[in-house]
Image (cartoon, rainbow, N blue to C red):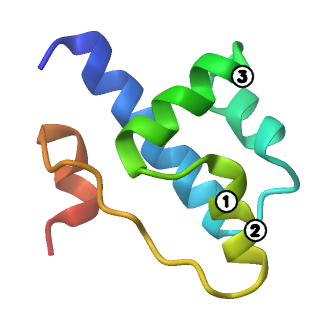
């Protein structure tokens, strides 16, 4: 995995945690994690998790959300290793 991909995946995992914790908006948590182009961000999130960040936020607000596991890689070692 390229360094750029590793860093992006770590940032996307941070966004997911923010959404699960009730971030005020998708835009806010995306910007907080360094995603400036929201269309590119949404596509990257969907590619990794299989749903749009707005879908995760909606499910989290209803109390129905759980972590979606990305394709396992070195980037998720600290969140997936128990």
Q: Position of residue 50 (x, y in %)?
A: 42, 50
Q: Are marks 1 and 2 in contact (CB under 8 Å)?
A: yes
Residue that label 3 marks = 38
**Residue at mark 3 to residue at mark 1: CA–CA distance:** 15 Å
The answer to whether residue 37 is above or below residue 16 is above
**Residue at mark 3 to residue at mark 2: CA–CA distance:** 18 Å
Foreground of the two, 16 or 38: 38
Q: Position of residue 67 (x, y in %)?
A: 43, 70
The part of the image, by quadrant, that contains residue 63 is: bottom right
Residue that label 1 marks = 55
The answer to whether residue 80 is above or below residue 7 is below
In what element is the residue under mark 1?
A: helix
> Looking at the image, which residue is at 61% across and 32% down?
42
Q: Quadrant of the N terminus?
A: top left
> For mark 1, does the 10 Å Cα neighbourhood hold few (<14), some (14 to 19), or many (20 or more) residues?
some
In what element is the residue under mark 2?
A: helix
> For mark 2, does the 10 Å Cα neighbourhood hold few (<14), some (14 to 19), or many (20 or more) residues?
some
Residue 46 placement, left or right of 30: left
Residue that label 2 marks = 58
Q: Earlier in the sequence, mark 3 or mark 1?
A: 3
């Amino acid at each position: 995995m390229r360094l750029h991909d590793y860093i992006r995946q770590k940032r996307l995992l941070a966004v997911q945690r923010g959404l699960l914790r009730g971030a005020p908006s998708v835009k806010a948590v995306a910007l907080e994690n360094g995603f400036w182009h929201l269309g590119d961000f949404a596509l990257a999130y969907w590619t990794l998790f299989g749903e749009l960040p707005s879908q995760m936020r909606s499910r989290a607000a209803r109390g129905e959300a759980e972590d979606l596991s990305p394709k396992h890689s070195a980037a998720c070692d600290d969140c997936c290793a128990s």
